[in-house]
Image: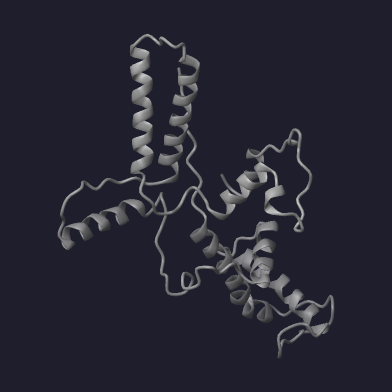
Amino acid sequence: MSRKTAYDTIELRPLKNAPQPIRFSEAWGRASEPFKHQFRFAVHPWKPAFASINKTIEDAARSLGIIARKLQAGDPLHEVEIMAVHAFELGSALHLLSGNYRLYRFAHGDYSSKALNGFLERIKQDFSGPHGQTFSAKKYDSHRSYLGTAQDWQWFLEAETRELDTSVSVDLYELARLYCEDLRLRAIRRKAPRRTQAHGHTGARFKSKVVKNRRSAVKRHVVKIKEWIRKEYLPLPSAPATATS
């Protein structure tokens, strides 16, 4: 999935029997259950970056064992359809678990610090690459609740809208040119930072040196949001393998 194909994976449909719009003046108790469910999911995601999965696997194993025993007994209560639905849900949950996370096992027991650090180093080596990457926490991870300034988001979205890649010299130059135009307009309106130079009147072309000098400034805005997104959002699950007959 990429930013170009993401829109094709989503199909919007009207919600049947949709409740009335929610307003800030309404109490929490009057909100609809679908809204409460989505709000809790947004505030407290169900997919934390670090957590134990033992209980998830234990519950799945117990449920599959119950289904197996009932099938072995010949389904005396005629629950095949119910068991099939439940087994499908378990399979989907385990598939998402394996797709969203890189799973490792540690046997219960005592380990020396050297042995444990060796395991962690092997995990780091295996995880790096196709599953993710590690980066320095000295600059971007020092602000855990950082959401980005209005300027950061403005130029990140500007680059995304125009499909400009800041790692490509030509694209970065074009984004810097737009950045210069924005600074010029703000300077004329006296809304730009102090000592900001307009470099000519509205519509005049900028000197190449002026644009080049501002490439690093606009790139910093874009990189800040990219780093925040990479830190806060988990990678999308891998596509399921297509069965062939």
Q: Identify the coloring.
A: one colour
Image spot of residue 3 (x, y percent): 62, 50
Q: Residue at x 49, y 37 (%)?
A: 239
Name the one closer to the observer, 97 or 23: 23
Q: Does residue 124 appear left or right of residue 171 in this picture?
A: left
Image spot of residue 147 (x, y percent): 59, 67
Q: Does residue 225 appear left or right of residue 201 in this picture?
A: left
Q: Does residue 46 appear left or right of residue 74 in this picture?
A: right
Image spot of residue 235 (x, y percent): 49, 50
Name the one closer to the observer, 75 or 156: 75
Quadrant for residue 37, please give it: top right
- The quarter of the image holding the C terminus is top left
Q: Residue at x 57, y 49 (%)?
A: 41
- The quarter of the image holding the N terminus is top right
Give above or below for 242 relative to 78. below
Give above or below for 97 relative to 183. above
Name the one closer to the observer, 116 or 68: 68
Q: Does residue 190 appear left or right of residue 150 in this picture?
A: right
Quadrant for residue 169, please give it: bottom right
